[in-house]
Image (cartoon, rainbow, N blue to C red):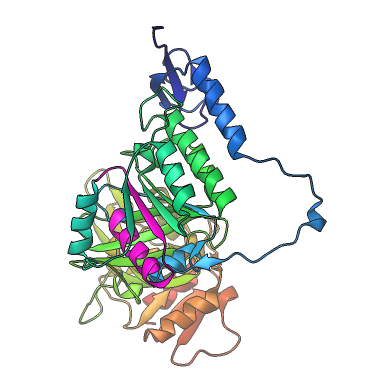
Amino acid sequence: MAKEKTIYTCTACAGTSAKWLGKCPHCEEWNTLIEGVEESASASKNRYSTARNLAPASAVTALSAIEAQDVDRTPTGIEELDRVLGGGIVEAGVVLIGGDPGIGKSTLLLQAMDAIQRKSGNTLYVTGEESGSQVAMRARRLGLDQSGVSVLAETQLEKIIATLEARTPRIAVIDSIQTVYSEQLSSAPGSVSQVRECAAHLTRLAKTSGISIVLVGHVTKEGALAGPRVLEHMVDTVLYFEGETHSSFRLVRAIKNRFGAVNEIGVFAMTERGLKGVSNPSAIFLSQHAEPVAGSCVMVTLEGSRPMLVEIQALVDHSGPSPRRLSVGLDRDRLAMLLAVLHRHAGVACMDQDVFVNAVGGVRISEPAADLAVLLAIQSSLRGKPLPKGFIAFGEIGLAGEVRPAPRGQERLKEAAKLGFTVALIPKANAPKKPIEGLTVHAVERVDEAINWVRQGF
């Protein structure tokens, strides 16, 4: 028997190296090479032969001659999940969902499969990490004792594909892709080559048979999806399951979606009966203060197509020789830039102060529209004077001290008015042409105007 040869495969570009290197020689990414076993020539030949059989040839056709058709979707019965998917799971689509262990991926998918089974029928749940009895125990805990979802406990790719071809379910879940292996490859389950090839075969099967497939993916300790980066390129939709260990709330975020909006989010609450959608997520990210407090400013952020109100809190305190700048849920480098703009263009100095900024509820805000709210919260904490009750602000701050407009400002203002906010400080370019009932809008062009407006008592 020939001795197996060790080979190192890059998780970023799938390139190979005969020896371990700190940096991949192909894509030059650091610490991406993973040890594995080189395939034999016969295994490689069988693998590509199988791939050719799965991919029937098609004629070359002019783009103008191809008829564009609307995609058929299957609603999952869970409103927040359908929002993220763009209305439901697309026929013959492949969805990849990843998240930390125990965050609720399997729970959410089992609930969705049960809802689809009751409405449309013919679903299949393939579990590679649990036995059928363990899945049944979870279903009983979720109140799904009488569920008609079919369950298959299997990890071999060839058997899974044979079952899918025989039963032709409307939707199938593979939990998880890292546990699936093909006999055509000699490497271990979860290796780069196994994950890549198994996902490619399942994707091809979905496209040729019309079966919608949902793949569950593991994540690394850095929070990225485990396996080769090409895994995310192959599928149609990539969802990330996010949540804090100390919180019962979960966020499902669309990172890639060929059939819907990107960066759309769904908000869930973990309960004894599984995950429940949260219809008003703004309530999660707003603290319940009886009276306004210093250092707090509410902003309206956009997550996909959904405007949400988030409270920004700041604490400014006297510092020693080395002042600290710390932000949670916001970009720390941007905080340092905003403090410099605040000093240069508004005359507010924080050189001898520690500055701590936090986005309430564990939400992460990446858009620059939070800049104005951050500066107003810092100014409020520094002066020890709260902003008025029912006050919101949003807008991007430039290095020249200008207040730049935020996208879809009208939707942000309407959401704030709907939730009972009465005063808004916004960029002049976002000023509404028609008054918004119940909302007084103050538009500014520069950061010093905003700070002076706050100093003068609104």
Between 334 and 16, the one nearer to me in the picture = 16
Q: Is residue 374 magenta?
A: no
Residue at far front of view: 166
Q: Is residue 360 left or right of residue 20?
A: left
- The location of residue 393, given as percent across then percent down, is 43, 73
- Asked if one can make out residue 444 in the rendered structure from this viewpoint, the answer is no
Task: Determine the residue positioned at 31% across, 83% down.
Answer: 389
- Residue 105's spot in the image, x, y percent? 32, 54
The x, y position of residue 259, in whole percent, is: 57, 60
For residue 191, above or below residue 25? below
Residue 52, placed above or below residue 28: below
Q: Residue furthest bottom?
A: 437
Which residue lies at the image location 21% right of the left edge and 47% below the top edge? 320
Q: Is residue 41 left or right of residue 316?
A: right
The C terminus: image quadrant: bottom left
In the rendered image, which quarter contains the N terminus? top left
As for residue 123 lying within the magenta part, the answer is yes
* Residue 70 image-quadrant placement: bottom right
Residue that appears at 35% across and 44% down? 176
Can residue 146 be seen at all in this image of the molecule? yes
